[in-house]
Image: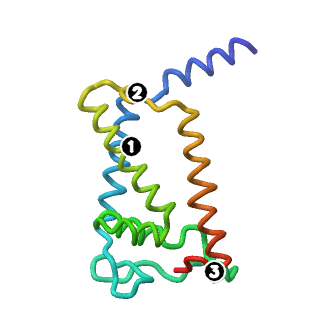
Amino acid sequence: MRDKLEAALQALEEARMPDWGWALTLFLTGVLAVGVSFIFYPSEDPNWTMILGRQFGGECGFQVALGLPCPSCGMTRSWVWLVRGEVVKSFTYNAAGSLLLIWLAVGGLLGGLRLVTRNYKLLTVPFNALFWWTMFWLIGPYLGMWVARMIGFNAI
């Protein structure tokens, strides 16, 4: 039994993504998030975004099914406005979305720096810091704004 466990652990270690792969993943994720935000653009109707001259999206399935705003409502619009420098408008649509895009962009920059310098441990963030930032983001801006919207504050 022990031999099988050791063999499985050895296989996992050999299949592990190389450090440059993680740096490339960070970089590409950041570039993709910011790039997609530029492809979409604001609509004259503040409830929609546009892409290729067409209105993007449809009615929120969560809101249609439950009659409540969903926690992600406004995220696309928050990204669209943030990349255009409209920070206040971005945070008004969805603060969690704004922070998520900033987080992804910073991660992309970090991944790019790691690739350029070939120092794949450059500015390594401790796991505890990532965990607590994620908990803050989830409980504060994401769920907090959702609860605020359900009681009528900042309804978009």
User: Residue 44's x, y, as percent?
Assistant: 33, 87
Mark 3 element type:
loop
Q: Distance between the residues labelled 3 and 2?
A: 48 Å
Residue drawn at x 33%, y 43% is 27
Mark 2 element type:
loop
User: Residue 67's x, y, as percent?
Assistant: 68, 83
Residue position marked by numbered label 2 in the rendering: 18
147 sits to left or right of 86: right
Residue position marked by numbered label 3 in the rendering: 152
Residue drawn at x 66%, y 69% is 147
User: Residue 29's x, y, as percent?
Assistant: 38, 49
Indicate the amino acid at tag 1. Gly
Indicate the amino acid at tag 3. Gly
Residue drawn at x 55%, y 44% is 133
Looking at the picture, tell me which residue is in the foreground, 148 or 33: 148
- Give residue 107's mark: 1
Q: In this view, does 69 lie above or below 139?
A: below
